[in-house]
């Protein structure tokens, strides 16, 4: 695609955003709504539309090379990501569920489930690729230095065999060797017999030439017709979508060419950005040198003119605005001298009133409490008297957004600057120098204004002393008093703030980083993408919910949630600071469903550091209370300094054990139980640090402290039929297999109900050995081959799945959902009783008439 094509993608996204912003401003109704279905429908529609815009803007930002355009797109892109998170949070609070289904909205907008897949912006990693490479080098270097530890672990893992076991193993291997030799000998005998039989065959009669040709033609025509029919049948199935297209191991030339162009565009982006940064510095310097003296003179003349105008209008010289109020910028904000003088006088009056009110605070507080109590009583009486007010207060309202102002600002810049701008001459898409000059001229003017303000304040003082010395003295005294009071305020503020003790103040971050790697607390995550977590969309979610049955989430839903709650906030600082704050995340589900893989994908997609604080990993390290404090201090200090960071606690239920098993008492699994809530409280919006816990046995944990730490819980289920079908195809092709008509994947997917991704992977690895891959051309894969390896593994039974459902229902969100369901049932019963009474009344009225 060309520059203009990506420009059109951006323009279309901005057009859709403009329509959405108009809808949002129109839908901000002051009256609360009560119809929950209608509320969810509006939220879901906004969510789906914003995701569409997010996908388009991500492509545009990744491929557009113009540096100034990319800055505008980045602002809007961050705003859209934040708005998506806000809408998702609204839906969670409305339905008391993390999983939502948008089938109706997708049908109305004529979209597919793939169209609402949350994209992962590439700039999360690409903009800090150099830093990540340096960290990777340090990590690899330290791990190679600590390499000699591995042989010891291998020695400890070897099993010591008894003499009888060793003899039995030797006997088994010897019998196998003899059997192979015997089979080889028998094969050679059969081959020799076949040769002798063919040599002894004599043709007693020869066929006629025409008859032989007819037989050959008959065989050939039959073969060619069967081949043709088979091909036509396959083409028809492909057209109807009944058979998946053949998988080609070789990547298409066009795809390779497109990938090369994308890489080339990223190089051009870096070049244009470097040129833009150089131009910014040089243009600012030239403006400061050439236009700076003129700007200074014009500002001084304007301020002097303001002095004279205020003197003529009010009879005295005005007070110069403070730096906190904006300095001389307040003067030129399109206001008359009288208005400016009035504003300054009003501010002085407010300051004096504040001084007076300080002494009377205690009395006023008591009066305020009494007034509040009276107001509450009056409100209660009003509510009892009026039913309409109750409805207005009980309904649902959209909570205010932190990202709509940024979206409106970004869209305004696009409309004013880029919407109508002619870019036909700028074919290479370099920066626009005129826009840089306008921006830097403002910056230079602000810098010069600060200098001018200092000069003009002194000049105003001299004028006031010359005209009216008494007033100047009084004002000086007042200013001295203000300065003293400000100092006192500063002392009070200093007492309130309590800084935490830095236990490693004498150490650098690099030394702490190295120590954590050596101790195994900072781990290198494997390179796994979120897209590698294969799973299909749930097509029965809406249907089951309409039938009052809570469906198990699909793997696609889990992937979406991981992108929303993990990847987007960790990847962008602007999104993390303003979006609903998420400090902890819990992934729970049976073993083998991919919880650890999701943690690794989170680190890969955001370029985050991975700290392992699992009970098994920290046992024996940094013993005692002081050691534990030092360890946690080091981990979270490095995590904050080198953010984004993910702190992973595997088997986190052990930290909150109800009762520690005897076998695990030496490990001290509950070391973090007291300190973990304190750490969670200490994390702020500017800290891009996420604590992720994984557990396959949440039932063993004490629920209250467990849910206090992990407020966001994602249940990762075993794959359903559609996800298993996709998984089988993906894993077989990835391990070098070929899918043909003889391999009935549908049957294999049905048979493997209850098996997880790990089970399927192990079965495929057991079948697709090197020898089997070589024989694929002569002997294609069949479904029966995978049954044996699957049967040797234990599946996940329905009882375990129901146990997870029951546990999730006891969590705070599950309890809220159960209460809401009971309330809706009660309302339906009351409505039913009311309808029956109306019907009885109608029948009695008819009988009386008769």
Image (cartoon, helix red, strand yellow):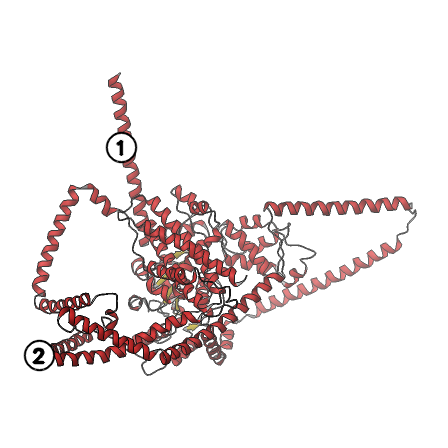
The percent position of residue 40, horizontal first and vertical second, equals 36, 47
Front-most of 463 and 384? 463
Q: Is residue 747 above or below residue 532?
A: above
Question: Residue 135 falls in which quadrant of the image?
Answer: bottom left
Q: Secondary structure at mark 1?
A: helix
Front-most of 393 and 319? 319
User: Quadrant of the image for the C terminus?
Assistant: top left
Q: Secondary structure at mark 2?
A: helix
**Crowdedness near tag 1: few (<14), some (14–19) or many (≥20) residues, C-alpha within 10 Å:** few
- Cα separation, mark 1 vs mark 2, equals 83 Å
Residue 612 in view in this figure: yes
Q: Closer to us: mark 1 or mark 2?
A: 2
Front-most of 484 and 793? 484
**Crowdedness near tag 2: few (<14), some (14–19) or many (≥20) residues, C-alpha within 10 Å:** few
Q: Is residue 289 left or right of residue 739?
A: left
Question: Residue 388 falls in which quadrant of the image?
Answer: top left
Residue 592 in view in this figure: no
Disc on res. 781:
none
Q: Earlier in the sequence, mark 1 or mark 2?
A: 2
Q: Is residue 550 above or below residue 714?
A: above
Q: Residue at x 54, y 62 (%)?
A: 2
Residue extending farthest front: 312
The percent position of residue 375, horizontal first and vertical second, equals 13, 52
- Per the image, the residue denoted by label 2 is 470
User: Quadrant of the image for the N terminus?
Assistant: bottom right
The percent position of residue 113, horizontal first and vertical second, equals 47, 51
Disc on res. 834:
1
The percent position of residue 192, horizontal first and vertical second, equals 82, 59
Front-most of 243 and 654? 243
Residue extending farthest top: 850
Q: Is residue 627 above or below residue 664?
A: below
Q: Is residue 504 left or right of residue 538?
A: left
């Amino acid at each position: 695609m060309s520059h203009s094509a990506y420009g059109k993608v951006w323009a279309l996204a901005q057009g859709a955003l403009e329509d959405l912003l108009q809808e949002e401003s129109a839908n901000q109704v002051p009256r609360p709504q009560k119809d929950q279905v209608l509320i969810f429908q509006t939220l879901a529609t906004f969510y789906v539309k914003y995701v569409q815009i997010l996908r388009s803007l991500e492509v545009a930002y990744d491929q557009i090379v113009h540096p100034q355009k990319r800055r505008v797109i980045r602002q809007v892109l961050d705003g859209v990501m934040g708005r998506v998170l806000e809408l998702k949070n609204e839906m969670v609070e409305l339905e008391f569920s993390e999983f939502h289904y948008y089938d109706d909205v997708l049908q109305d907008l004529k979209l597919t489930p793939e169209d609402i897949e949350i994209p992962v912006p590439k700039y999360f990693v690409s903009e800090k690729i150099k830093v990540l490479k340096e960290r990777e080098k340090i990590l690899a270097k330290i791990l190679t230095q600590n390499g000699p530890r591995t042989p010891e672990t291998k020695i400890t893992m070897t099993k010591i065999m008894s003499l009888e076991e060793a003899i039995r193993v030797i006997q088994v291997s010897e019998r196998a060797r003899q059997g192979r030799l015997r089979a080889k000998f028998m094969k050679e005998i059969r081959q020799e017999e076949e040769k002798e039989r063919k040599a002894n065959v004599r043709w007693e009669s020869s066929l006629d030439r025409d008859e032989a040709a007819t037989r050959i033609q008959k065989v050939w025509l039959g073969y060619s017709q069967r081949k043709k029919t088979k091909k036509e049948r396959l083409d028809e199935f492909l057209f109807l979508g009944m058979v998946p297209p053949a998988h080609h191991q070789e990547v298409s030339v066009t795809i390779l060419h497109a990938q090369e162009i994308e890489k080339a565009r990223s190089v051009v982006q870096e070049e244009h950005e470097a040129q833009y940064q150089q131009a910014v510095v040089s243009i600012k310097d030239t403006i400061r040198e050439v236009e700076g003296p003129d700007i200074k003179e014009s500002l001084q003349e304007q301020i002097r003119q303001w002095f004279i105008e205020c003197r003529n209008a009010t009879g005295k010289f005005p007070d110069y605005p403070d730096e906190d109020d904006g300095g001389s910028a307040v003067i030129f904000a399109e206001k008359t001298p009288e208005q400016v003088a009035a504003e300054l006088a009003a501010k002085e009056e407010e300051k004096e009133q504040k001084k007076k009110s300080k002494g009377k605070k205690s009395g006023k507080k008591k009066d305020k409490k009494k007034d509040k109590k009276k107001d509450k009583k009056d409100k209660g009486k009003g509510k009892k008297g009026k039913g309409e007010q109750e409805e207005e207060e009980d309904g649902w309202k959209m909570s205010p957004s932190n990202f709509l102002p940024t979206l409106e600002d970004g869209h305004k810049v696009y409309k004013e600057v880029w919407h109508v701008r002619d870019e036909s001459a700028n074919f290479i898409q370099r920066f626009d120098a005129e826009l840089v000059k306008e921006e830097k001229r403002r910056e230079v003017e602000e810098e010069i204004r600060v200098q001018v303000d200092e000069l003009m304040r002194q000049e105003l003082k001299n004028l006031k002393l010359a005209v009216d010395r008494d007033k100047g003295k009084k004002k000086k005294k007042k200013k001295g008093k203000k300065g003293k009071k400000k100092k006192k305020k500063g002392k009070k503020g200093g007492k309130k703030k309590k800084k935490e003790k830095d236990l490693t103040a004498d150490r650098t971050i690099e030394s702490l980083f190295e120590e954590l790697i050596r101790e195994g607390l900072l781990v290198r995550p494997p390179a796994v993408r979120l897209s590698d977590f294969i799973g299909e969309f749930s097509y029965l979610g809406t249907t089951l919910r309409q039938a009052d049955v809570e469906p198990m989430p699909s793997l696609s839903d889990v992937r979406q949630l991981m992108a929303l709650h993990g990847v987007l906030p960790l990847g962008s600082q602007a999104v993390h600071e303003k979006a609903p704050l998420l400090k902890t995340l819990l992934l729970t589900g049976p073993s083998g469903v991919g919880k650890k893989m999701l943690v690794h994908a989170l680190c890969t997609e955001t370029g985050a550091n991975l700290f392992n604080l699992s009970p098994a990993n920290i046992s024996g390290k940094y013993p005692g209370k002081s050691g534990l404090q030092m360890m946690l201090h080091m981990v979270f200090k490095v995590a904050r300094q080198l953010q984004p960071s993910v702190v992973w606690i595997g088997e986190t239920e052990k930290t909150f054990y109800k009762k520690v098993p005897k076998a695990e008492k030496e490990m001290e699994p509950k070391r973090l139980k007291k300190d973990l809530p304190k750490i969670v409280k200490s994390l702020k919006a500017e800290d891009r640090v996420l604590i992720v816990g994984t557990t396959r046995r949440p039932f063993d944990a004490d629920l209250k402290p467990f849910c206090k730490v992990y407020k966001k819980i994602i249940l990762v289920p075993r794959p359903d039929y559609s996800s298993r079908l996709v998984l089988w195809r993906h894993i077989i092709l990835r391990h070098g297999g070929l899918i043909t008509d003889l391999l009935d994947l549908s049957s294999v997917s049905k048979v493997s109900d209850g098996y997880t991704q790990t089970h399927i992977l192990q079965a495929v690895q057991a079948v697709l050995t090197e020898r089997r891959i070589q024989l694929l051309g002569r002997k294609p894969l069949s479904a029966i081959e995978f049954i044996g390896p699957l049967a040797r593994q234990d599946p996940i039974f329905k009882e375990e799945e129901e146990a997870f459902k029951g546990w999730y229902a006891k969590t705070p969100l599950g309890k809220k959902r159960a209460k809401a369901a009971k309330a809706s049932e009660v309302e339906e019963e009351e409505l039913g009783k009311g309808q029956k009474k109306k019907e009885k009344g109608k029948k009695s009225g008819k009988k009386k008439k008769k």
